[in-house]
Image (spheres, coloured by chain):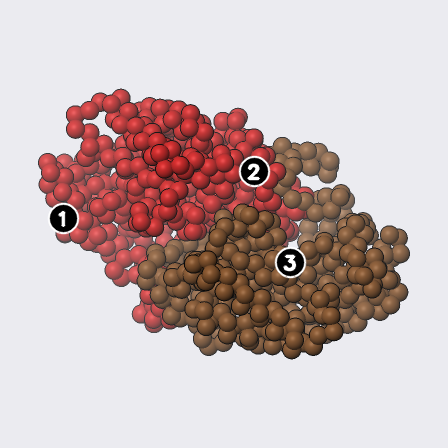
Chain colours: A brown, B red
Amino acid sequence: MDTESLLERRYRVLGRNSPLFYDKPLHLVRGEGVWLYDADGRRYLDAYNNVPHVGHCHPRVVAALSGQAATLNIHTRYLDEHVVAYAERLTGLFDAQLSMAMFVCSGSEANELALRIARDCSGGEGIISTAWAYHGNTAAVMQISSLFTPASKRGPHVRSVPVMDPYRDRAGRSDEELALVYADDVKRAIDSFAASGVRFAGLLFCTAFSSEGLPTLPAGFMGKTLDHVHAAGGYFIADEVQAGFGRLGSHMWGHQKLGVVPDIVTMGKPMGNGHPLAGLVARRELVNAFTSRNMYFNTFGGNPVSAAVGMAVLDVIEDEQLLQNAVTVGEYTLARLEELANRHTLIGDVRGAGLFFAVELVLDRHAKTPATAQTKRLVNLMRDRGVLISRIGMHDNILKIRPPMPFSKQNADLLVDTLNQALAAL
Amino acid sequence: MDTESLLERRYRVLGRNSPLFYDKPLHLVRGEGVWLYDADGRRYLDAYNNVPHVGHCHPRVVAALSGQAATLNIHTRYLDEHVVAYAERLTGLFDAQLSMAMFVCSGSEANELALRIARDCSGGEGIISTAWAYHGNTAAVMQISSLFTPASKRGPHVRSVPVMDPYRDRAGRSDEELALVYADDVKRAIDSFAASGVRFAGLLFCTAFSSEGLPTLPAGFMGKTLDHVHAAGGYFIADEVQAGFGRLGSHMWGHQKLGVVPDIVTMGKPMGNGHPLAGLVARRELVNAFTSRNMYFNTFGGNPVSAAVGMAVLDVIEDEQLLQNAVTVGEYTLARLEELANRHTLIGDVRGAGLFFAVELVLDRHAKTPATAQTKRLVNLMRDRGVLISRIGMHDNILKIRPPMPFSKQNADLLVDTLNQALAAL
């Protein structure tokens, strides 16, 4: 099947608006570790996908999936050891207060459920998210996903706080001063709910602010923010779909890096290494209160196959020391990207943590004018040269680099060397 | 792990409100075909679960899952043959007008998306469902799921039409007269939206009215209903999560049995035989219009593994002639259940189609007083005797019997003979 005919066939049944990466879509047939192979047998370094968290088609995950699928796959209305053991293992990775788990199939469903719990338990409706966020595709979650939903369509129960952007907005201020600015933004949104008679339910954000551009966060901003949220009777929902499972290297969860304990934590993409597994952990009293008032059942959520897959992912993270790898290779990659910034003035800023990097491109380092067109072109040039990355941010001028976790220093060299060539070829 | 300790461990991490079947929860360890095995090695005939549609752990489905998971599992932002081939095969099973597909992970996500499309394309918000329906667990879908959401919490954009119940409400009327009553109910709900200034978006129901009690539908009711829906500028969303994939035997889809072509059809549970695969097919113009105005992407939806699994399920349905089996064994089972009704006055009505049966229990055949307590007890007695069924309906007095599709006449005999004994032991 040649790629052009496949594209035409796809347009017919899925439509032309079903999103595809790159000017020349990539026709993939195989994946292994950090590598993807196209229909012509060409190999691509995957420096973008976080769904295959422990590596494409990891044999231990595939074995867990296949073995359990051949043995028993049933829902949680029957007793099954796998989901219980997985819930114990998972909650064991969080602060003791986050002691209960609920399982669903996607990050969207996890955030849906978190919103339902926060609204039910607070008795309020008002949710705060950031001004360039994406948290999923259901109606309620789209309302708080400001990236794709204009303010006019978010409804009266949603407020947005400005995107944190210390690279542009520092203006000589200290971390402490910046932290106060961000906490004040949240306080202002809470006050605005009160002023319009909307009861506050909670604050939801991605703990790495991934879609927002992966800003380097000022220490301590979250402590003050959390005080405001709790004082107003709301809950803090930490979206760990992107930052979680050790992506940031130093900690298993983004909120741990921020030094706070959320009320609810949602998880998705990397959780099942591609298998549709997602979920949340939350304070015991929230889960019990919500489920005592609302029948919640998710047919596929927490089935034995998903639980076995989730457990295998945790085994691999631990046995292959992937957090340690993220720290070591992450620091190495960051240093090499910073070297590159010395050679290419287009690079305005390099930042990141663990195996999650943002390279912000600007036309002018002083004015910081976003190099939007160049960023798009660069992503395509990288694809043509066999390295897969993408872009993010309010100005679409930030390279998003977020490889599978078994990324090595050699992989980092290939990434940075190819980026060097692509920048030269721009 | 003994069952009691497992239950205690489950309560700690999942809570006491996470629903479990039966007074004595069943601790399962293995499934095969129509059989489930508990931790003590005891075998149960599964006459309830429709998720393992082609049989528990069907080897062809497991092989497709394992093979593809070991080869490539990626999202639809890259080109991949599996999702395209599956979308072509799936849409080929519908009327030519339903020519496009969108894939998600659960029936909830499918109904969420269908509501978003109907609301976006109609420009309205008003949705009609039936008064005892369940369509999923997200906020928007819960609003129309009257089974768990009281009228006071459904909001101004939802109307319910009464449950069809010809067993109780026929009152000497002909099918034609009844059909008119139901179509008029929908018309009245549409008018009520108009009267309160809510623009109508659509009608959504399960094409077998499963949660409502699997009523024997009067011929032709849907034609008139559809005229009302379209005349008011709304869309008909057929929820095929329970009735679809040949469950009713005579047709692949419940709406085909009703003799109409919906605007959107949602699918879930049986689609991936337990793998979290769901989706919708819809009229081309609806999908194109919606996606031109709304970025829709579902990370796990339509991944190569899900597509390969979905394809294997369709292969098995076809190769093992499961629709024909549903017709043959279904008729046999229905006849045997009717015989049972001659022996037990508790059975007020026996109805169904294909491999989906409702046995309605009443204290008095004339007054039709629901035998609610007896129904609950009977379901537990059946479990103790090794046959798994459940119950449905507004009065919780209807046995719900809906086995995996490879159900045989011998399985039907065991089901009916056990039911006979359990009724005698009540």
Q: Quadrant of the N terminus of chain A?
A: top right
Q: Chain of mark 3?
A: A
Q: Which residue is mark 1?
A: B424
Q: Nearer the viewer, residue B381 or A360?
A: A360
Residue at x 23% of width, y 41% of height: B359
Q: Is residue A332 above or below residue B142?
A: below
SS of the residue under disc 3: loop
Q: Amino acid at mark 1?
A: Ala
Q: Amino acid at mark 3?
A: Ser
Let me know if marks 1 and 2 both belong to one chain: yes
SS of the residue under disc 1: helix
Let me know if marks 1 and 3 both belong to one chain: no
Let me know if marks 3 and 2 both belong to one chain: no
Q: Residues within 10 Å of mark 2 (few under 14, many from 20)?
A: some
First reached walking from the N terminus: tag 1 or tag 2 = 2
Q: Residues within 10 Å of mark 1 (few under 14, many from 20)?
A: few
Residue A211, which numbered label? 3
SS of the residue under disc 2: helix
